[in-house]
Image (cartoon, helix red, strand yellow):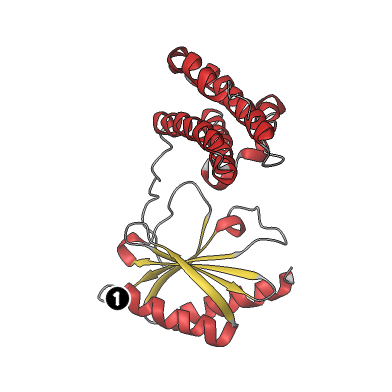
Amino acid sequence: MFEVDRRERVRTQLLDRARDDERIVGAAITGSAASGREDRWSDIDLFLGVAVGIEVEEVLADWSSFVYRELGALHHFDLRPGTQVYRAFLLDGPLEIDLGFTPSADFRPVGDGGFQVVFGTPGGRRALPSVDPEHLIGLTWHHVLHARIAIERGAPWQAEHWISAVRDHTITLACHRLGLPTSYAKGADALPPEVTAPIGEAFVRSLDTGELARALRAATEAFLTELQVADPSVLTTLQEPLRDIGMSVPPA
């Protein structure tokens, strides 16, 4: 992994560039460094406000050229929620840099993450859309059904995909219920053992039909166990059909 002092040098270099760029009117450190959780594996996360009358895409292109030319970026990808653009760069080492750009009117903390202002005046915090448990429950029964279909079709890789998705959504539902972070499994490691133990039984250990059927049974049972506390009324409706779908796969 990268050296921590290199990360500090690169972050300082980027912040110095932001101060010298007249198009940037606000800069903040975000991510783990802004919330007191930074460790030796953390990325560089910066959020930059772009002045009125300046196109975000223009600044993004200029800064991207700099990161490739001066910092040796290898690749990047974008996330574009609303007016913001988040560009994640991979450097050798490996070191990740996540740069967010937004019009100055939207320079503000988003969600409940840390936001350490370096310069500029941010607006009020904007909440992220919350997890919709009903939608997640619908996705999960859908995935149980399609895992069963994939097993019977003899499509083991597709079955593994759907079983893993059932497991992941069950984790998200449990995190939401317990008030833990739900994105990217950030709250998963804080779940109590009585929640994670049945979910852990749903890992697929091989692509044999028998093992896929076992993992689907475990994933289905873990989902139903979560429904028992998360939404008992839905459990009453779904318990019998899901047990029939996910827990009665015929032998190969």
What's the residue at 43%, 52% (across, down)?
Answer: 110
Q: Measured from the top left, where is residue 176 in percent x and y?
A: 51, 33
Residue under pointer 1 = 55
Q: From where the camera sits, is residue 127 visible?
A: yes
202 and 195: which is toward the camera: 202
**Which of the 4 quarters of the picture holds residue 167?**
top right
Where 251 sits versus 91, above or below? above
Left or right, 38 with reference to 26 = right
Q: Secondary structure at mark 1?
A: loop
Q: From where the camera sits, is residue 191 visible?
A: no
Residue, far left: 53
- Which residue type carries mark 1? Glu
Residue, far front: 252
Structural crowding at the residue carrying mark 1, measured as other residues with C-alpha within 10 Å and reported as few (<14), some (14–19) or many (≥20)? few
What's the residue at 60%, 22% (across, down)?
Answer: 221
Q: Measured from the top left, where is residue 89 in percent x and y?
A: 54, 71
Where 184 sits versus 171, above or below? below
Left or right, 80 with reference to 223 = left
Q: Measured from the top left, where is residue 147 in percent x and y?
A: 53, 35
Where 105 sits versus 5, above or below? above
186 and 245: which is toward the camera: 245
Which of the image's four quarters has the N terminus?
bottom right
Which of the image's four quarters has the C terminus?
top right
Q: Measured from the top left, where is residue 49 in percent x and y?
A: 38, 68
200 and 2: which is toward the camera: 200
